[in-house]
Image (cartoon, helix red, strand yellow):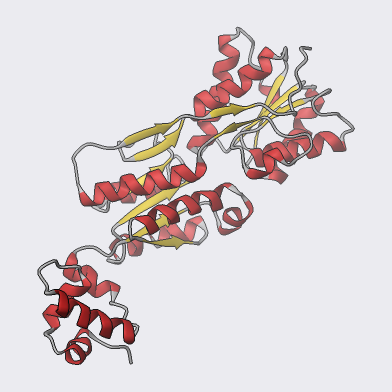
Amino acid sequence: MPLTLEDIAKHAGVSRATVSRVINGDANVKEQTRVRVTEVIQKNNFQPNIAARSLAAGRTNVIGLIIPAGVSAIFSDPYFPLLIQGVSSACNIRDYSVMLWLAEPEFERRMMRQILHSGLLDGVVVASMLIEDPIVQALHDSNKPFMLIGRHPSLDVNYLDVDNTNGAREATLHLLRLGHKRIATITGPQNMIAGHDRFQGYLRALEERGLAFHPELVAESDFSEPGGYAATRRLLPHHPTAIFAASDMMAEGAMRALRDAGLRIPEDVAVVGYDDMPNASRVTPTLTTIRQPTIHMGIQAVNVLIDIIQNPVSYKRHTVLPVELVIRESCGTLSK
């Protein structure tokens, strides 16, 4: 049976209240008493009950990370491990723990009440949500501090995002500067804000250069490599000379489809991705892409959320991080 505060107090020869003050870092405890209690705690590997500490202190130092994208996507898309790495590292530095909710989206939505009212979480980070995701509405209606990674189009909530629209615009403009006129795009899901914003950036670049929009040069997909492959197969009959894929995974799928069709990259079709995942510099040819600071996004989201938890304010925090065009081999350099 695990030790209780009463057991620790008995072994240390102090009161239960003194043990509680030591555990919670109360400065008004004599140093010799603190040392004696700490030695008993360490000797017995005592771990305070999180729920009990929550009731006593009002905080658990636990942050929930919800990624309503499906378990398979979390483990197959390199974006999510990098994001989780950033969240985890920031929590470690700030002496917080992370509770990662791994479940299919519909299950997570049914469990939302339990997540919000379990008493185990001080706050929540939500990443990769749908535009009208009920998880966000439930959080908005609650008193639980939360941060979105990705802006919300209608609710005034705390969020951190990257400049997806301008990033996609720069990717498309780069292809236009190389002389391409028939630029196709493989979009992300249009019910996700990142997919929507990156498509808008593509459209904005065409508009700035006075080029007509051709619906047949647009294929919606799901940010995955197989999705990029299938989308490219749909685009090839319309003879694009370049493809902007709204994720590196889809860009890799596009490159595989182009090779299977007997086309050369970039001589026949140029390719640009988005994310700058580690594999972008390893594929052949190396991938021109838009670099977003994925790990830093996780770090920054946690830091802002903890600040909100510790220093509540009435206004909402909106942070937009810049992105960067990284030019490699998949676009070539010659105008067509």
What is the quadrant of residue 321 in the picture? top left
Q: Is residue 142 left or right of residue 165?
A: left
Q: Residue at x 45, y 61 (%)?
A: 101
Q: Quadrant of the N terminus?
A: bottom left
Relative image position of residue 132 (x, y in whole percent): 42, 42
In the picture shown, does residue 302 fall above or below 170? below
Residue 123 placement (x, y as % from top left): 31, 55
> Is residue 154 something one can see in this rendering?
no
Q: How many marks?
A: 0
Vertical position of residue 269 compared to residue 87: above or below:
above
Question: Looking at this view, is 322 or 176 the one in front?
Answer: 322
Image coordinates of residue 238 in percent, x first then y, are 78, 23
User: Which residue is most to the right?
Assistant: 262
Q: Is residue 76 something one can see in this rendering?
A: yes
In the rendered view, tell whether residue 214 sits above or below residue 16: above
63 versus 231 height, above or below: below
Q: Residue furthest top?
A: 210
Residue 269 rendering spot, x and y as whole percentages: 79, 25
Query: Relative to residue 11, is residue 113 drawn left or right?
Result: right
- Residue 161 lies in what quarter of the image? top left
Q: Residue at x 60, y 9 (%)?
A: 209
Q: Is residue 217 left or right of residue 78?
A: right
Split into 4 quadrants, where in the image is the C terminus?
A: top right
**Looking at the rendering, which quadrant does residue 51 occupy?**
bottom left
Residue occupying image coordinates x 72% and y 28%:
271
Q: Residue sitting at 35 percent across and 83 percent down?
A: 45
